[in-house]
Image: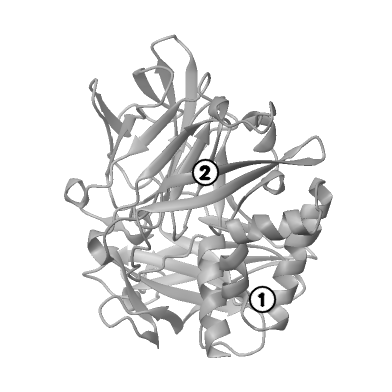
Amino acid sequence: MKKRFLNLLLIFAMLFNFVMPFKVHAVGVSEKAWFIWNNNGNIAAYYFDDLEGADGTGENMVFPINMIRASDIDDGGVKPNISDLVKNDNNYAWVTETGHDEIVAAGITNWNGFLEYKNNVIEHSKEIDDRDYEWDRIFDPMGGRTGNNSISTNANRRFRATIYNDSTYEAIQFGTNVNDYVYFPSDWDPTFMDSTIDISNTTEENPAVYSSFLLEKNLKFKVSDFSVADIKSVTALNVNPKAVTISLTPDMCTIKFNSNYYDAVTFKLTDSNNKDYYLKVNRYTGKMFSNTQFYGDLDDKLYFGLELFYDSETSYSDYEVKAYITYNDGSTKIIDTKVVNSWKMDNDTGEWVSKKEYNAGVKMKSAAFAFELTNNIKSVDFTVIKKNALSDIANTYGGTFAGSGKGIHFEKEVQQAIERSRRA
């Protein structure tokens, strides 16, 4: 059970973008894999026999990104239509040689047959209590993400790759040099995350999204070498003109946030062909979780909460997380959440430990605040305040931690977080 517990924890971390502060070891510098995709209901496939894999170990490990033009992928005259494939994550997959051999041996040629095969692998893995082995043996890598004109691997262990539409691809790459920032979240670590964001075909209503820790005032990005055009201007939308300072040079764009009030800002980027793109920067202080996807010292009841991130010179005891609950009958209530222990791997020892507070990056720590989730709850808003900010003993209001509005909003019915942010 312990092995399955750790395997599932790794899987959930990748699926839900949890911070996983452990060291990974390189598996080689040359990798092989099949990329298969849905071609009008049939399977199309292309074999890569020389993908550049991870190089180095531990903190010195580097993940080169294999940039692959979609026009170079060909299965007997069939090429992947990236803009169509990205509409559904079930339209494509990376598969190992072993997995591809099994698909061929089973005579699977249609896409629905492949999805059934994939689901059977997952179910069989659960039955033998070894999902990690089964998944690794057939699907490589776990996880992936898409832009409007690209398909990228993500949170993987063997290689990094991006298949892009070379005629329309526009992307920016955020800086990952720790020395450029005061706060550097663990999930910015290039060991686990590709910092390149596809901004192709974005609109103000549907921008590309990048997440940053709210207390970090600076962001840096450059245009990807594989983009179709350079960016000539960057403008912040719907905020006070003094809210951000933008510095743009041919080599780098630096955005400085001048207030922690602005926790979600959309930018318009215009390229050298006068085409506009849109990027939304979400500056987070917390990420929501339930104990169906979070391992902590909680009982069998369903809990919901916020993993709070804060300056490492402070402690979780310096903050309070208030849950503003709206019930199905329209009534509301504000309750205090409680700090709970959570299981994570220790950065220094590599051992799994259960405690209340963890290192979450450079000059950052995190802790989990939770409450019991009942069936009659419709939605929850989490507001983070400084300790005793609402106490009767205090002579003045202690102040919120940061941000605007009620904070992070969650609709139980649709099971998703919705950002609520007022604009100035």
Distance from disc 2 to disc 1, alpha carbons, whole Å, reads: 47 Å
> Which amino acid is tagged 1?
Leu
Q: Nearer the viewer, residue 219 or 265?
A: 219
> Can residue 118 be seen here?
yes
Mark 2: secondary structure? strand
The residue located at (77%, 72%) in the rendering is: 376
The chosen color scheme is: one colour
Label 2 neighbour load within 10 Å: few <14, some 14-19, many 20+: few
Q: Are marks 2 and 1 in contact (CB under 8 Å)?
A: no
Instruction: Relative to 369, say whether 242 is above or below.
Output: above
> Which amino acid is tagged 2?
Phe
The residue located at (33%, 34%) in the rendering is: 243
Instruction: Relative to 160, say whether 74 is above or below.
Output: above
Residue 71 pos. (x, y %): 56, 25
Q: Nearer the viewer, residue 71 or 358?
A: 71
Q: Nearer the viewer, residue 74 or 7?
A: 74
Residue 274 pos. (x, y %): 45, 9
Displayed quadrant of residue 387: bottom left
Q: How many marks?
A: 2
Q: Nearer the viewer, residue 351 or 364?
A: 351
Displayed quadrant of residue 353: bottom left
Residue occupied by mark 2: 48
Disc on the earlier residue, 2 or 1: 2
Label 1 neighbour load within 10 Å: few <14, some 14-19, many 20+: some
> Can residue 415 be seen here?
no
Residue occupied by mark 1: 373
The residue located at (82%, 46%) in the rendering is: 110
Mark 1: secondary structure? loop
Asked if residue 313 lies left or right of residue 10, the reply is left
Q: Quadrant of the C terminus?
A: top left
